[in-house]
Image (tube, helix red, strand yellow):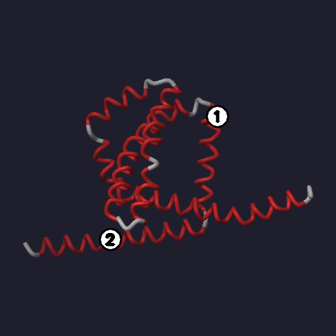
Amino acid sequence: MSESVPLFRSVLRRVLRPLVTVLALAYFLIDALVYWVVRPFARWIGRLPVFGRVAGWAAGLRPYPALLLVLLPLAILEPAKPVAAWLFATGRPWPALLVLGGAELVKLTLVERLFHLTRPKLLTIPWFAWIYARAVRGLDWLKALPPWQAVRRAARRLREAGRRVAALVRGWHAGGR
């Protein structure tokens, strides 16, 4: 009986590891795609004067209040992804895209900037530094996987093609004047 438990765990690990890897890759891929679309808007919003004042205030926080400052908007906005998935699954793609895009825009703008401002303080918290190091290592591992690399190459080709098309359109537009 006791030999069957480790065998069961071993089989479960072999079955679940590829599934979890695919799900994690899909999650990060969706996040990266949304980031690619929302990034210009997030940069524009991030240049607003209010963020300069917030930056000065956030940089002066102690480690645990800084952690709370980063986690609060993340905790509020991250549940928007399942809501958007539900809206999409129930046949409402436009509201789904609006919910996902809006939440990602706010999340990227707030959390990314707040994390960037407070990271030195956050890394003074031992358990946070430990988790952060493993998360970075895990992301590096995911990014090294062949499917991730293939998606990055495809995205790069699409971006280059988009730039060529945009240059062509600008050339036609300038020539038509």
Picture coordinates of residue 171, whole percent (x, y): 19, 73
Q: Earlier in the sequence, mark 2 or mark 1?
A: 1
Q: Decide which of 23, 129 is in the foreground and name it.
A: 23
Picture coordinates of residue 131, whole percent (x, y): 62, 41
The residue furthest front is 90
Q: Using residue 92 as the reference point, say whether residue 20 is left or right of it.
A: right
Q: Distance between the Cα atoms at labels 2 and 1?
A: 43 Å
**Count of numbered circles on the image:** 2
Identify the residue under disc 2.
Answer: 162
Picture coordinates of residue 63, whole percent (x, y): 53, 27
Q: Decide which of 64, 116 is in the foreground and name it.
A: 64
Q: Using residue 173 as the reference point, say whether residue 20 is left or right of it.
A: right
Identify the residue under disc 1.
Answer: 127
Residue 175 versus residue 123 in the image, above or below:
below
- Residue occupying image coordinates x 63% and y 50%: 137
Amino acid bearing label 1: Trp
Q: Quadrant of the C terminus?
A: bottom left
- Residue occupying image coordinates x 50% and y 24%: 62
